Image: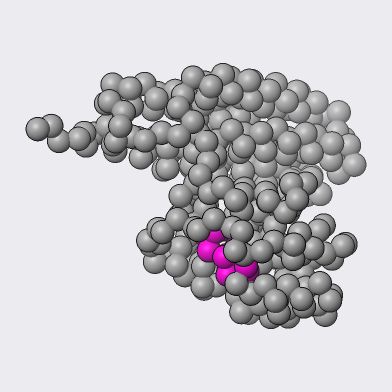
């Protein structure tokens, strides 16, 4: 884990301006109550919204980051929430749990061997009162990806999220032998998941290659928008099929009391559900609304 060290290398002046977006009240409250969790060596360091570090004694690197790079941390938090607002439905679909926790959201950053440029971000929510005393009870709400130097994402970020599903499914299968009581009993489920994820990966990439990387709906005809919408919907249908398979597997594991492993399946299912919600709300939902409200003709 080297997120603290990588952020220390970045000069705020070198970063592009964040898009000037108006956040709704939900995202504004999340921004105000956003905690950061950054790695330095083998330790994860928790930073409060005001950049204090209540959970542990900070390392010299963390102290330097908080002291000298507060502007960068402000930039980072705003960038995280702007990305959530534009390229994710995580906050919307988890709004009940977030609101119950006084809008506390925790962002755990994982640098992706990019020299401090790109990060995978896992998001959690937790009761503010019990954050330190029962940290392990945090609720996983999903993951996202950010690029500090490029806000704009091709294909609404779908390609990267589907690649992440493949990575997560491989980790899931790798954990099975160590965590399951009788791993061979579930061989057919792992085979189905592996095949479905492979199909989603190949089919979705083929579909995306046929679509404009950056869609400017105002410049596209209604007929083309209908076709683009249908192509994205086709990807969503593959995801729904996999979600059903994983849900069946999850239910069986709970029935069999495979407590040590089922939580990993639940987390994988959460990532799947979040991706389906991205299609329903931000992609197909937005495109359908645009098709139903065509541009006024002179």
Left-right relation of 215 to 37: left
Colour treatment of the image:
one colour
**Quadrant in which residue 188 is drawn:** top right
Q: Is residue 79 magenta?
A: yes
Q: Is residue 257 magenta?
A: no
**What secondary structure prevails in the magenta region?**
helix
Residue lying at 68% horizontally and 23% vertically, measured from the top left: 198
Location of the C terminus by quadrant is top left
The image shows residue 88, relative to residue 15, as above or below, that is above
Observer-nearest of 130 and 278: 278
Observer-nearest of 136 and 212: 212
Residue lying at 46% horizontally and 49% vertically, measured from the top left: 86
Q: Report the span colored magenta.
A: 72-81
The image shows residue 147, relative to residue 229, as above or below, that is below
Location of the N terminus by quadrant is bottom right
**What is the x, y in percent for residue 210?**
49, 19
The image shows residue 1, relative to residue 270, as above or below, that is below
- Residue 94 visible in the snapshot: no
The image shows residue 180, relative to residue 57, as above or below, that is above
**Quadrant in which residue 20 is drawn:** bottom left
**What is the x, y in percent for residue 281?**
41, 43
Direction left: furthest residue: 298
Residue lying at 45% horizontally and 27% vertically, measured from the top left: 212
- Residue 62 visible in the snapshot: yes
**What is the x, y in percent for residue 156?**
49, 38
Residue lying at 67% horizontally and 72% vertically, measured from the top left: 69
**What is the x, y in percent for residue 206?**
56, 19
Q: How many marks?
A: 0
Observer-nearest of 147 and 165: 147
């Amino acid at each position: 884990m080297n997120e603290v060290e990588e952020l220390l290398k970045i000069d705020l002046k070198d970063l592009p301006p964040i898009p000037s977006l108006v956040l709704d009240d939900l995202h504004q409250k999340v921004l105000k109550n956003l905690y950061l969790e950054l790695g330095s060596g083998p330790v994860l360091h928790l930073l409060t919204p005001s950049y204090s570090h209540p959970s542990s004694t900070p390392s010299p690197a963390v102290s330097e980051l908080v002291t000298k790079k507060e502007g960068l941390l402000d930039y980072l938090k705003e960038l995280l929430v702007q990305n959530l607002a534009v390229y994710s439905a995580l906050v919307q679909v988890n709004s009940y749990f977030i609101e119950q926790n006084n809008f506390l959201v925790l962002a755990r950053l994982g640098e992706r061997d990019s020299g401090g440029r790109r990060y995978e971000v896992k998001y959690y929510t937790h009761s503010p009162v019990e954050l330190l005393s029962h940290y392990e009870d945090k609720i996983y709400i999903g993951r996202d990806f950010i690029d500090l130097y490029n806000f704009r994402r091709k294909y609404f970020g779908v390609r990267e999220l589907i690649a992440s599903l493949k990575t997560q499914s491989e980790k899931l299968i790798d954990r099975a032998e160590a965590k399951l009581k009788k791993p061979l009993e579930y061989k057919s489920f792992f085979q189905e998941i592996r095949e479905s994820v492979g199909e989603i990966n190949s089919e979705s990439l083929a579909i995306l290659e046929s679509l404009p990387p950056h869609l400017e709906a105002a410049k596209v005809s209604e007929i083309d928008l209908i076709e683009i919408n249908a192509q994205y919907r086709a990807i969503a249908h593959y995801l729904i099929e996999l979600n059903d398979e994983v849900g069946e597997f999850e239910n069986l594991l709970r029935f069999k009391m495979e407590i040590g492993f089922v939580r990993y399946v639940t987390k994988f299912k959460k990532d799947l559900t979040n991706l389906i919600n991205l299609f329903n709300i931000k992609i197909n939902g937005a495109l359908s609304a645009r098709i139903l409200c065509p541009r006024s003709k002179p």
